[in-house]
Image (tube, rainbow, N blue to C red):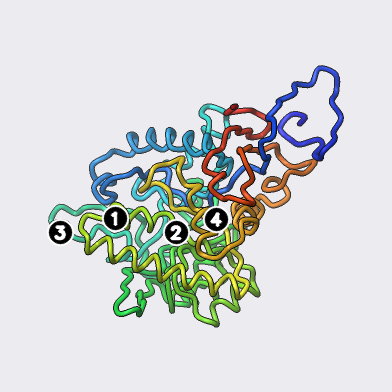
Amino acid sequence: MVGERISEAGTSVTHPAGAEIIDLGDRTLLPGLIDAHIHLFLHPGAEDLQTVQESAPQRTLTAVLAAREDLMAGFTAERDMGTEGAGSADTAVRNAIDQGLFPGPRLRISGNAIDILGGHEDAIGYNPEQHVLPNATQANNAAELVAAIRQQLKEGADFIKIYETGKDSLISGRFSTPFQFTAEEMEAAVREAARVGKRVAVHATGEPGTLYAAQAGVVSIDHAFQLSDATVQLMRKEQIFAVPTFTIFEYFAEHAATPADGARERAMLNYHAQEFKKQIAAGVPIAMGSDVGPFPHGTQAREFVLMVQFGMTPLAAIQAGTVNGAKLLGWQGQIGVLKAGFLADIVAVSGSPLEDSAALQKVSFVMKGGVSHRRP
């Protein structure tokens, strides 16, 4: 490495006079890991209550600590998929990390994300007279979508995150979820973001919302439980990423409030796993994303294990969390590969993750931009 970039890579490289040599023994070197679906502003516990009870300044401090945990676990780049009611506070976190004030991954941020009245992130179940605020910016037609997008970009968002489906149900093996924005509204959103060179990602679990999103030209469909043949074909053709986020649903199943809730979450996870196998076989591009936040930051490498368990090869899972993640975040040619000229984002693990994906849960060395943050 020279400065923040890799100058040479291979089994034999030159060692300039005075160069520091870091001996990692027989550890396996990989590009820095990339998580394409995180929530720095969330932590384990009742998600709806923490966003109501904790102030934005308190949640921002929590986000800074979460960013460090993720970096120490080997995640040198991440995409934050919404502050869940903290507005554009993620702009300050991203900028502080970029300025070297705090350790953390490279970040692509979406601000507060966008939802509809009564939608997935609205404050439902509270006393209406208390006027509890939603955890996303509300928009109810194309004009309001455009206005919300412009405001979020003004406040520093790198991309736009839209909730396109919810609430989900799985009854007798049949999955269903209502769409939130029409096909025409999704097209208006993607068109407005594209006007200034930005992209749209969606929370979308099933049809027809997933098809509306793909037809509009989003960059990723996150969660993606259910994809029709038409949606799969379009995603393969246009290279729209599916981001499965298995780990969050495993966590919900294991930490459910009641046995019935746990059984429901487990059934949803099993359904998603079966659909995921079909998506892989059909050639849908996959990027690693864990939805970390509601479960502890720094533990999301579990997602690699689950992607392999549910049908990916270990190599494909690694690529989903490196080179594919780099492309999804718009950093292709900069990160995701150990190659001369790329940024020196490097991690090391004991053992071979090609043989056991769990090795990625035991990162012992982390370098970001040529600076070592963790050593054995």
Q: Which residue is mark 1?
A: 134
Depth order, front residue of 25/18: 25
Secondary structure beneath dot 2 equals helix
Q: CA distance from mark 1 to mark 2?
A: 25 Å
Q: For the residue marked with disc 2, what is the amino acid?
A: Phe
Task: Find residue 88 and report its horizontal and vertical position in percent.
Answer: 43, 45
Task: Find residue 27 and report its horizontal and vertical position in percent.
Answer: 66, 36
Depth order, front residue of 36/181: 36
Which residue, as the protein is rendered here, is positioned at the far top? 18
Q: Is residue 109 left or right of residue 234?
A: left
Label ID, residue 71: none
Q: Quadrant of residue 324?
A: bottom right
Q: Tell me the mark number nearer the camera, choosing from 2 and 3.
A: 2
Q: Which residue is mark 3?
A: 128
Q: Which residue is mark 2?
A: 246
Q: Tell me the mark number nearer the camera, choosing from 4 and 3.
A: 4
User: Of marks 2 and 3, which one's residue comes earlier in the chain?
Assistant: 3
Label ID, residue 288: 4
Please say if 204 is above or below 8. Answer: below
